[in-house]
Image (tube, grey):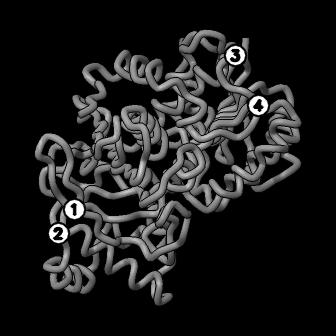
Amino acid sequence: MMRILALGGPGSMGRVAVRVAAGLAGVREIVVADRDLDAAHRLVKELGGLPARLSARQVDVTDADGLAAALEGADVVLNTVGPYYRFGPAVLRAAILARTHYLDICDDWEPTLEMLELDGQARAAGVRAVIGMGASPGISNLLAARAVAELDTVTDLYTAWPVDVPGSGAEQTELNGPDGRPIAAAVHWMQQISGTVAVVSGGQVVQRPPMRPVTLDLPGGRKGTAYTVGHPEPVTLARSYVLTGESASLMVVTPGTAAYLDVLRTDLDEGRLTNESAAAALAKPATRRAMRAAVRAFGFKAPGSLPAFFAAAIGTADGRPRTVLAHLAGAETLMMGMDEATGLPAALGLAQLLDVERVPPGVHPPETAIDGERFFADLAGHAGSVRVIVE
C-alpha cells in the first residue's frame, strides 16, 4: 500500500489529482503538501471520507531541507507545483536522492530537457519518474502514439490543444486564482509564447520564435491553421520516434485571441512585461493592447474545421503517403477547465506508475511509459463519453 506526497495538492489541478488518486487501488495515504498549510488542511477536510487517509503538511519546495524531510517515507511524489521552469528539476532531483518515485504535469519544454538528462541518475537509484502527464503534454502524447502506430515511417508529427475555440470547453477556463492573482498555468503560458521555443525541423530539435502558423489538411476534410507554442511534446516525441521532418505543439485559437497573444509576446520580448504582468494582462486586457490586437487580427488565420484537441502524424504506410489524425470525441466537459483536464490524467498516470511491472526505473515521457489503451479506457470511466477516434 502506497503513501503519496501530493506537492501543491490544494492547487486547482492538484486537488483534482488528489481526489481521484485517493480512490486508486493500492493507495493507503496521501499527504497534501503546500506552503499554505491552511489550504492543505481545507482540502483534507473537503475530501474527508475518501478511501485513502488524508493528512496535511506544510512544504515549501524552495526549501531543500524541508522538501527532503517531506519526501522521507513517501513512496511516490505527485508534483503539481508550477510553473515548472522554476521548480520542476529541483523537485525531481530531490525525489531521486530520496529514492521516491515521481510524476508531474510539467508543461514547459526547458525543464523537460533538464529532467530527461536525469534519466541515468533515476535508473541508478531505482526511481520511476513520468514527466508531463496532464492534458498537453500527457493526453496529447498518447494521441500522438496512437497516430504513429498507424505508420511505418513518420515525417511530421503535431499535437494541438484548444484555447478559445467555441464549443471546446477550454474557452471557459478561469485565469485568476481565488486570491485574484494569475494562476501558475497562465504564467507558464506567457513563458511559452515569448522568446524562442523548441520545435523539430529536419528531424532535429531547434529553437524558433513562437506563434508561427501551421496550416494542416487532415483526414475527414478537416482544414485550418494553428499556432506554435512552447510545450514539451516536440522535445519528447523527437526522442521517442524517428522523425525526419517537422514537429510542434500547436494552439487551436481564434484570430482575435492569437493577435492578442502576439501583442503580449511583443511586449514580453521587448521587456515591457514580465510573465506575471503579462498573465494579468491576459486575464484583464487593457484597452490599448486590445486595440493593437484588433489591428493585428487581420494577419492571423482561423482554425477552420480543425478538431479542438488532436495529434496528427504524416508519413508512410505500406509504401504510400498517409496522414493519420487521432482526436478526442465527447471531451467538451473534460476540457471545460484546466484543472480537470490536467489533474485527472495525472491521477490516471499515477495508477500506472504504481504498477511496478509497468514502468521501469528512469525518467520517461508519457508516450514511452503509459499504456495508452488502458489510459483512455480509464479516462472514459471517469469522464463519461470521452473516446479516441483515429482516422
Residue furthest front in the image: 319
Badge 3 density bin: few <14, some 14–19, many ≥20, Cα 10 Å: few
What's under tag 2, amino acid-wise? Lys
Mark 4 and mark 1 in contact? Answer it, CB < 8 Å. Answer: no
Front position in the image: 325 or 170: 325
What's under tag 1, amino acid-wise? Thr
Query: Of the residues under marks 2 and 4, which one precedes in the sequence?
Result: 2
Residue 358 percent coordinates (x, y): 65, 20
Element marked by disc 2: loop
Residue 285 percent coordinates (x, y): 28, 73
| Label 1 to label 2: alpha-carbon separation | 6 Å
Query: Of the residues under marks 2 and 3, which one precedes in the sequence?
Result: 2
Q: Which residue is mark 1?
A: 225
| Label 4 to label 1: alpha-carbon separation | 39 Å
Q: Which residue is mark 3?
A: 357
Element marked by disc 3: loop
Query: Of the residues under marks 3 and 1, which one precedes in the sequence?
Result: 1
| Label 3 to label 1: alpha-carbon separation | 41 Å
Residue 361 has which mark?
4
| Label 3 to label 4: alpha-carbon separation | 10 Å
Mark 2 and mark 4 in contact? Answer it, CB < 8 Å. Answer: no
Residue 155 visible to an observer of this rendering: yes
